[in-house]
Amino acid sequence: MAEKIFSKAGGLPRVKLSHAPAGPNAFKRMIDTADRAEAGQLVAVYDKNGNPYGTAIYNPRSQITLRIIDRANPEEFLVDRFFDEKVSRAVAFRRDVLKLPEKTDAYRLVHDYADGLPGLTVDIYKDQIALEFYSLGMYRLWPNIEAAFRKHFPGAEFHHRATSYTQEMEGFSIKPEPGPSRKTRISENGVQFEVDLKAGYKTGFFCDQRENRLYASQFAAGKKVIDICAYTGGFGIYSAKLGGADAVTCVELDPEASEQSKRNANINKVKLDAVCADAFTYMRQMIDLKRKYGLVVLDPYKLVSSREEREKGIFKYRDFNRIALALVEEGGVFVTCSCSGMVSMEEFSFIVRGAAANAGRKVQIFKKSGAGPDHPVAADYPEGEYLKAIWARVY
């Protein structure tokens, strides 16, 4: 068990760096020696002169060999104290500083590097807590992590998630939870959504777009709205319930997510047209039919997830935006998003400008935004600023 393996600092394997990393990650080329270290273990890290550097999660098969979680003397590191401090600080930030429970019962509790827990994100959905793992080491420490959270949420039920890509790259496997789907109903800004903790993408819902959904709804009054790559209908349902849209269309390729958007519409007593279709195909059909919309929201899945996919993904972003811009009515509002951490806001802006030129549309950008405040960014890990939203009026 993780408690036995990692409870004593004196037993940590030692890793010596050949040179120090600029941020919280160290790659293979930065490591001199790794004494007794095995994949998924916590290790004591020392610099090239043998001085204490910190404590890290070690995985030689991962692209990130060391995820440095603490810069104090590793000989004094205690794993349970570490998680108690990090989790308490993260929970207090959401509860006491951001005061998120006043407007929602669904939000991010831990955001990876920014909360000092690299390789882990945690979302809470009412009394359900979803742990999404990005590293073998964090997954092996799940008993310690859950114990820290139970001190703040004693009645919570926990769920473990990780993408198949992460499990393959990091070298672990999460067995599907037995039994039927585990659904709960959450509320944000007065809008309700049903979340399935055993299905869907990430942890089942995208809390990061909460503030963007609310802001977008103010442009929906009396308009025809199309939510492209709608997942379970977030932007579209906000537009119908809070924004007073004349008509809402949600386009989503995943049939289960599309069906969920219908259920979410029923929960909120609003009407929407849930279209289960490929976004490219559907948008081209609407262009052929000369359909126009007063509010167009484009929020595709991550198109650039690795350096190898970069060129192909950027081309897709450009094509997506070029076609979507053709659907915006004269003077309408266009909201376009990217959740690819490897694409900066500056580069995404360049893509949108190029797409506008190719579409023959004049685009007036009036706002740029990102994820909600419960998704903070570590100053030494700017890649954590993954979500980008560009808001524009189109002529």
Image: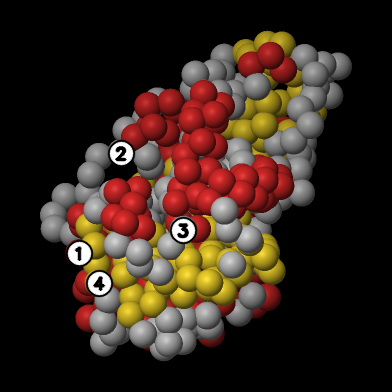
**Mark carried by residue 326:** 3
Q: Position of residue 223 (x, y in %)?
A: 43, 81
Left or right of residue 93: residue 173: left
Neighbourhood count class around disc 3 (C-alpha, 10 Å): few under 14, some 14–19, many 20 upward: many
Neighbourhood count class around disc 2 (C-alpha, 10 Å): few under 14, some 14–19, many 20 upward: few
Who's the residue at 42% across and 33% down the image? 166
Q: Secondary structure at mark 2?
A: loop
Looking at the picture, which amino acid does disc 3 mark? Ala
Neighbourhood count class around disc 4 (C-alpha, 10 Å): few under 14, some 14–19, many 20 upward: some
Q: Is residue 42 visible?
A: no
Quarter occupied by the C terminus:
bottom right
Pointer 2 or 4: first along the chain: 2
The relative height of residue 320 versus residue 186 in the rendered view (above or below) is: above
Looking at the picture, which amino acid does disc 1 mark? Glu
Q: Secondary structure at mark 4?
A: strand
Quarter occupied by the N terminus:
top left
Instruction: Return the residue at label 2.
Output: 174
Between tags 1 and 2, which lies in front?
A: 1
